[in-house]
Image: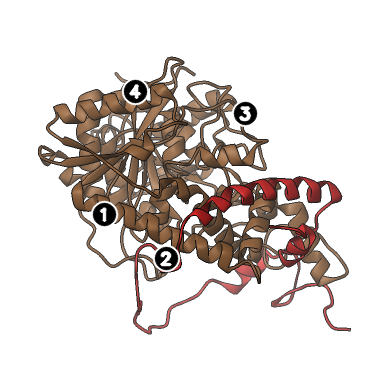
Amino acid sequence: MKEIFYCSIKELRKLLESKKITPTELIEIFKNRIENLDSKIKSFVRTNFERAFKEAQTKKEGKLAYIPFAVKDNICIKGEEITCCSKILKGFISPYDATVIERLKNEGAIIIGITNMDEFAFGSSTENSCYFPTHNPFDLERVPGGSSGGSAASVSAGFVPFALGSDTGGSIRQPASFCGVIGFKPTYGRVSRYGLIAFGSSLDQIGPITRTVQDCALILSIISGKDSKDSTSVEIEVPDFEEGLEKEIKGLKIGLPKEYFVAGIQEEVKEKVLEGVKILEKLGVSVKEISLPHTKYAIPAYYIVAPSEASSNLSRFDGVQYGLRKESADLAEMYEVTRADGFGLEAKRRILLGTFCLSSGFYEAYYLKGLKTRTLIKRDFESAFKEVSLIVTPTSPTPAFKIGEKIKDPLSMYLSDVFTVPVNLAGLPAISVPCGLSKENLPIGMQIIGPAFREDLILRLAFWFERETEFYKIRPRI
Amino acid sequence: MIENIEYIAKLAKIKLSPDLVKILSQDLKRILEYIAILNELDTTQIPPTTHAIENKNVFRDDKSASSLDREEILKIAPNRKDNFFKVPKIIE
């Protein structure tokens, strides 16, 4: 029989339903695998098998009954320590469940661990964690991507069938592409952000990381939908994403934005994505070159908007209500020393950048300019979607880079998100699917972007692509 | 351009060591130089986008519901007294 830890959710459900395996045995299998191998990968910052075994012995019903999963360290789980991999939140035991956690628990899923990330999701390599860096399962000397690097690595390594991540500028899709798995960033407002510790509130979305498109569709169907606790979640029908996967894709028109295939992109990334496009053509999809003319302005606009929102959101970490406090005789100084000690270097960098962009005298030249540029980027996509149904691009300009390679140069790290950031600025849904390996055996990801709330269309194209190519069967050798 | 990073750090309530003042000034200078590419764009007639997906007038029924348990919240506070968060003295 196939290795159980690499079974899809659907396969695991069949094994459980036919009683070929008990829930306790299933948790045991994943526990053993994590204990044997995570010392190399370091995808988890905390595991809670005791609680998982207890859960496995209670009666569970639902589409995910007894299916274990992992959660990024910025999504609140009642009774668990959640820290955003930041020293400033150490010891924070969440008093409530995020809405996504509530929904997954209601379907019977069981949490087995919390995954590593860049502090407050600031980064593209998971090296900015206050704990330790995570290693890419395909090459232990390389980063898993970030900021949801722990979640992507844990799914890639067969530690869990699925994990949750969050995506503000590519933090689900880029690590999924580096680790050879599926990562989905839903339309802004599709999934409730209640209980997601905020980074950039107008950009953040929670999404699934899985090994198959079908599992991705299943999880997305469960976590999507209006939530009265998040007023930015949108009241719009949630289709059964799984049901629509097999619908015909013949006749779909996809666009290749010329700005995404230019200098700066590694040649073999370009080759593999274009080979992927050929396969889509073979499946009956037509292809058209399009233009998203403001693409080069997306990263600078993002590095105004996102840090500005972050500097405001992170003002709540002041040592008063939870987390770290550095005692001082004076309240103002207590804030300053607590935040100096609690935030890592990249967090400080972004808070200061955001504070500057919002400060009196600079607000119009920076923050407002960023928001206006955002309008131009959004319009680019709107006019593109008048011509094509979906847009296909590389997820990242390179495969996984080496640990330590970019950490000293913030700007080069920021540029690794050049193809994912525009999607967040425009609020659109997008997936990263594996489209082959580089010569060095590193996964390469293809990004499919859709119009707002057309997750169904993205998933359908990804499903047909996956069925034709079966890249999901490529496993890392750990 | 950022001329006085210590002033920005004061606004952000983060105490910076002299070493960090130097490192972060250089980093931010480089990032802002890069961001300056936006000046190529004439955006005078362009409205700003704060949220990409418009969602106006969100209402819900005005029904009472239970909120988080006070003790659960206070339990994780760094310092408390009775039902309050305790902080250093503010008023002399």
Decide: marks 2, 3 in contact (CB < 8 A)? no
Q: Is residue A476 above or below residue B42?
A: above
Q: Chain of mark 2?
A: B
Local SS, label 2: loop
Left or right of B34 in this view: A64? left
Q: Amino acid at mark 3?
A: Glu
Q: What residue is pinned by disc 4? A: A271
Residue A67: image quadrant is: top left
Q: What residue is pinned by disc 3? A: A405
Q: What residue is pinned by disc 2? A: B49
Q: Which comes before the other along the chain, label 4 or label 1?
A: 4
Q: Is residue A57 visible?
A: no
Decide: marks 4, 3 in contact (CB < 8 A)? no
Q: CA distance from mark 2 to mark 4?
A: 35 Å
Percent across and percent down for residue A314 are 62, 61
Left or right of A257 in this view: A441? right
Left or right of A212 in this view: A411? right
Discs 2 and 1 carry the same chain letter: no
Discs 1 and 3 carry the same chain letter: yes
